[in-house]
Image (cartoon, rainbow, N blue to C red):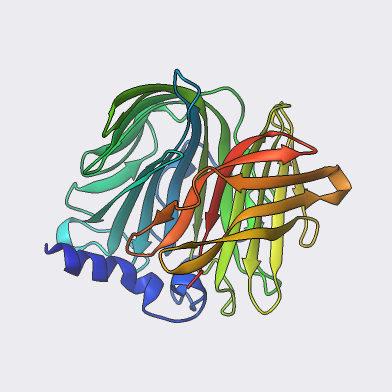
Amino acid sequence: MNARIVAALLLLPMAAQSQGFAGLGTEAQDFARPVPERALEFPADHGPHPDYRIEWWYLTANMTGPDGTSYGLQWTLFRSALAPRDGEGWETPQLWMGHAAVTTPEAHHVAERLARGGVGQAGVQADPFLAWIDNWAMEGPDFDNLRLTASGSDFAYDVELRAAGPLVRHGQDGYSVKSAAGQASYYYSQPFFELSGTLTLPAGDVPVTGAAWLDREWSSQPLAEDQQGWDWFSLSFDSGDKLMGFVLRGSTDYTSATLIAADGQATALADGEFAANPLEWHNVAERQVPTTWQVSLPAEGVDVTVTALNPDAWMQTSVPYWEGPVTVTGSHNGVGYLEMTGYD
């Protein structure tokens, strides 16, 4: 199928409507909706949920090379549905989009893949775990032991992931509320991956080691109609503790966060307890985007400055956004990742 046609089909359920960023605030008629009573089940929930409209497998990593240079890595597979069912061949309404990126202090390398489900070009299976689109893959005997590969015109990577801690459920045991009106998703993470492998960059191969964070989320209407974007932070402190927090921007901002202890114990923070305020803005892709932030959890003694490794980490993809590695200083030191959407 022509790539432009695939792109149009893929983006239709997300972007054809104006409500919320990428149409994620549109009414999800006939699709399943998250409910707080549903318990997450593993390994089944590592796999796809075709009766929900939107879903992703989202990995980011902070790495260093032999000379101490910092790098960032992203691998994302999105599933988007035209209808709440699965199917065979070209009859399936399931559509797929993949994003891969490597960020250095001087450069940001990006690639995108688009696919139709049902014809073997892309998909996910839970056990043994396999997520793929074209020749990009995240695969392993289980969710704790994975190999990750992707490539673009000017980069590639091949890394191994080993989980050194438990899965973390966000919100109410994985039921994550996104607005005062009650929009929600199912959301859990594996924030304890240890990483080793190789980046292939224009100057040659770079062996890297580091840590990775994998997010899993699915819903059918995760945003309210007035929410035009979000700022999402995954921060790993030198103490071993971690913090996930986001601000959903709308007529009234909505926040949520999870403070994760080094042993994996998670504390959910309600709307208003997490704060993220821009300190410096940067012009990228003809947009003004905040790339230095003050992030705080006053009740937990967290007050940090979050700074982009490379302010030009713009994802010029079918749905454009900013995504890149950050450094953390202040009450806690560390590294992490920042995603920002809806900056037009």
Q: Is residue 34 visible?
A: no
Residue at coordinates 49% horizontally, 78% vertically from top-left?
27
Q: Residue furthest left?
A: 1
Q: Report the front residue among 23 and 235.
A: 235
In percent of width and height, residue 99 lies at 35, 50
Tell me: 149 left or right of 192.
left
Q: Residue furthest top?
A: 66
Residue at coordinates 71% horizontally, 76% vertically from top-left?
252
Tell me: 322 left or right of 115.
right
In percent of width and height, residue 221 lies at 52, 69
Tell me: 324 left or right of 303.
left
Q: In which quarter of the image is residue 54?
A: bottom left
Tell me: 53 left or right of 219.
left
Q: Is residue 174 visible?
A: yes
In percent of width and height, residue 43 lies at 47, 36
Q: Report the front residue among 207 and 141.
A: 207
Residue at coordinates 48% horizontally, 44% vertically from top-left?
45
Vertical position of residue 290 compared to residue 189: above or below:
below
In percent of width and height, residue 250 lies at 64, 75
From the image, which quarter does the N terminus lie in?
Answer: bottom left
Residue at coordinates 57% horizontally, 54% vertically from top-left?
186
